[in-house]
Each structure stands twice: as C-alpha cells, then as structure tokens.
Amino acid sequence: MQHALYRAAKADPGRRFHALFDKVCRRDVLQRAWVAVRVNNGASGIDKITLAQVEEYGVDRLLDEVDAELRERRYRPLPARRVLIPKPGLQDQYRPLSIPVVRDRVVQAAVKIVLEPVFEADMADCSFGFRPKRSGHDALQVLVEEQQGGRRWVVETDIADCFSAIPHEKLMQAIEEPVCDQSVLTLLRAIVRAGAMEDGQVRRPVTGTPQGGPVSPLLCNVYLHRVDRAWDEGDGVMVRFADDMVVMCWSRSQAERALARLVELLAGLGLAPKAAKTRIIGLEVGGDGFDFLGFHHRLVRSRGDRGRPKVTFLARWPADKAMQHARDRIRELTSRRWMLLWPEVIVERLNAFLRGWAAYFRYGHSAQRLSKIRRYAQWRLAQFMRRRHRRSMAFGWQVLLSSRPIDLGLISLYGIHRRSQGGQALAGKTECRR
C-alpha cells in the first residue's frame, strides 16, 4: 500500500488524494501501528494505562474498538500528558514533551503509515530528519562533501520552539495541498487540537504539534517543507534535520544573504530562528567550529606523518553537550539508588547505553573522546564498588582489575580511521568489544 501511494504521488506531483481514511482503518495498518508503538515502549498517558496493561486487556480487542470508533466517527483523542524533560548537557533547561494515551498513539501511528509516502514523494533532498532511509549521518556527509568542494562559510541556526509554534491553520493548509480526504483532515485537526494536560488543567493552544506523538515529526517536516521548496541553492546548500539547519556557503556575503533569506522564509510561516544558536562561522584551520546533530565540526590539518601529504579536512567529534549527556547518564546508572543490585547488572545497563551512544558517534574523529567516556565509566564503577563494600577507592580499582572478565565485562571503546558508509574518506570507526 505504501509503495502504491508513493508511486502515485511521485508520478503526478499535483495529484490530490481523496480516499485515504479507509486505509487508516485497515486492520493490517492498525496492527502495524501497534507494533510501532510497542517497540517504542513509551510511558502511559493521562489515563495511566501502560502498554503491559493493554496487552493484558487484549491487543486485538483494543484494535477492534479503535477500528469501530474510527469507522463510526466516534473517535475523540484525549489530551496528552505534558512532562518536562531536561535538555542534554544543559542545566535548568527543559523541553516540553506531550505523551498521548496508548490508544491515541496507535491512531497517530496509523495516520503516519498512510500519509508518509504521500508527502515523502515531494520532500526535498536537503531534509534528513525523521524520514525513511535517511539519517543524521547522511546529513553530516553532505557537510563534508560541500566543505571539500570549497564551501567554508557556515550559517548555523535552529527554529525557536518549532514544535510548539507551528500555527494549526497554516499546518492544515500545507496538509491539504496533496490530501483532500475530509475524514482524514478532520481526524488530523482533532489530533493537533487535542491539547495537553499540565498541572491538572487542559490547555488547547492554537499553535503547535503534539511533540512526543508518532505523527509529530511528520507534521513538522510537512510544514517546514515550504522552506525547503522555496530555498534557492544560489544562496547556499542547506542541510535540515527537523528544526536544526546548516547552510554551507562560498563567502561571508553569501552566508549573510542566506541567513537573511532564512529569516524571511521562517517569518512567512510564523516562525523565527533562535537568536542564541544563530551565527555565521568562517571555517579555517585553528579557527572556530560549530555544533550540529551532536557533533562538533572544525577544520583541521593533518600532520603528514610517515611521508603522507598534509591534508585540510572537516573533522568532527562528540560535542561538549553530548559528552556531558553521556556522563550524566553514566552517573545515573551507577548512583547510590542501585546499590543493592549486583555489579553485573549495573555493567549490563552501562554496556547497553555505551553501545547505543558509540554506534552513533563512531563516525568521526572520536577516539579520544570515546576513551574519556570509557575511563569515566570505569571510575564510576570503581566508585560503585567502593561504596557497596564501604572500602577505599583502591579497593574499587582492584576489583575491576582482578575481575574476569576485566572491568566486570565493561565494553571497550576505541576508534580507528575508516571509510564512511558512502565511501568517502571520513574519520573514525569505533568498535565495541568485551
């Protein structure tokens, strides 16, 4: 079904789809939506019903009820539960997150399954965030290639409160361009206007998408596609990952024009760039760098060891915020609250985090910083053993060194140079071994 919708939208860019609601209600689509929700393993909404309780209640029974409510037009989404989660690496700064109830997450996932191929057919190549078969590493590869081509002026910015500032009416206008099925449009209006419950009160603003719901990233991409569509590559090569943007330019004057053009396009959508994160950087050896998608990027020059020629290239490694986030997570996993658990359980949890963290940051010149994170995890484990046995720090280190496997099985993180997935000469693979 998704392939058929994508081919139809790709073959006729001006086509409007009028028969999509029946596909949202299909049992195989709802079943696939439930699998996506279950794999994500999210928390409960305002009804406090967890995924485990839904499985006990009966998944087929729930999907039958959702199917009936949708077909009989009785479905009404509940307000999401609003929580504040700390921003990685930033103290006293939080990001609002809306958690819909399980039933509503299933419906949103089904809507995404049906609508994503329709909008994906028209998406621009500069967009990489939350799209099928695209990742952050693909966006980072574009920066490397453009720098190699001579673009060494960078416009760095992101959109201020993007998910909470998107106007509902303008968002619906963007959705209505390829979709004219009134049942689907009515369902989407209900989803974006469901609001959120915070401090016991339900708030229904006229702006924002339900950040935290399965359909939220798709709606964000649909709305910001208007920026991608209006962008002229004569103003620079733009790389967008959701609300984070970077523009690679030939000169400072071109970068200034690109920033002015971005401000103009965003203003037309009722959005604005975040002033604290908007700047123009000229890449030069020994100069400043910029952060994008968790990596810090900087122009460096190789030493030319062993007779090799000196090469200037765009290096990247985990940014300071990413490093602080990793330390915070390791500190949380080895805190006093877990003192009654076996050390092997703590190491297993640490390994699960480190594998995921290193799997993302292995592409880059990250060997030194990965080693720092590994040493910090060792130190926290030694602290954990010291406190568990009420002994000295030397005792904690002795336990790690004398254990078999060494360090209680904590994985090793180290980097070696390798070619990236696309075949270009990039830095660092990180291998994880026991």
Image: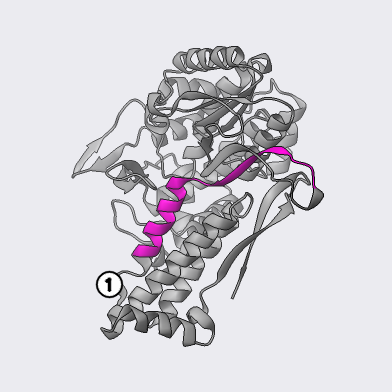
Quarter of the picture containing the C terminus is bottom right
Q: Crowding near pointer 1: few (<14 within 10 Å), some, many (20+)?
A: few
339 sits to left or right of 187: left
Within the image, what quadrant is residue 315 found in? Answer: top right
Q: Nearer the viewer, residue 402 or 100?
A: 402
194 sits to left or right of 68: left
Residue 116 horizontal/vertical position (percent): 60, 38
Q: Residue at x 57, y 34 (%)?
A: 286
Residue 380 horizontal/vertical position (percent): 38, 70
The colour scheme applied to this rendered structure is: one colour
304 within the magenta span: no
Q: Nearer the viewer, residue 341 or 101?
A: 341
324 within the magenta span: yes
Looking at the picture, which amino acid does disc 1 mark? Arg
* Residue 60 seen by the camera: no
Label 1, on which residue? 336
Residue 413 horizontal/vertical position (percent): 57, 65
Q: Residue at x 68, y 14 (%)?
A: 234
Question: Magenta part of the protein: which range?
Answer: 308-331
Residue 191 horizontal/vertical position (percent): 41, 37
* Residue 321 seen by the camera: yes
Quarter of the picture containing the N terminus is top right
Q: Residue at x 37, y 41 (%)?
A: 76
- Residue 329 lies, with reference to residue 169, above or below; the image says below
Q: Secondary structure at mark 1?
A: helix
Q: Nearer the viewer, residue 383 or 86?
A: 383
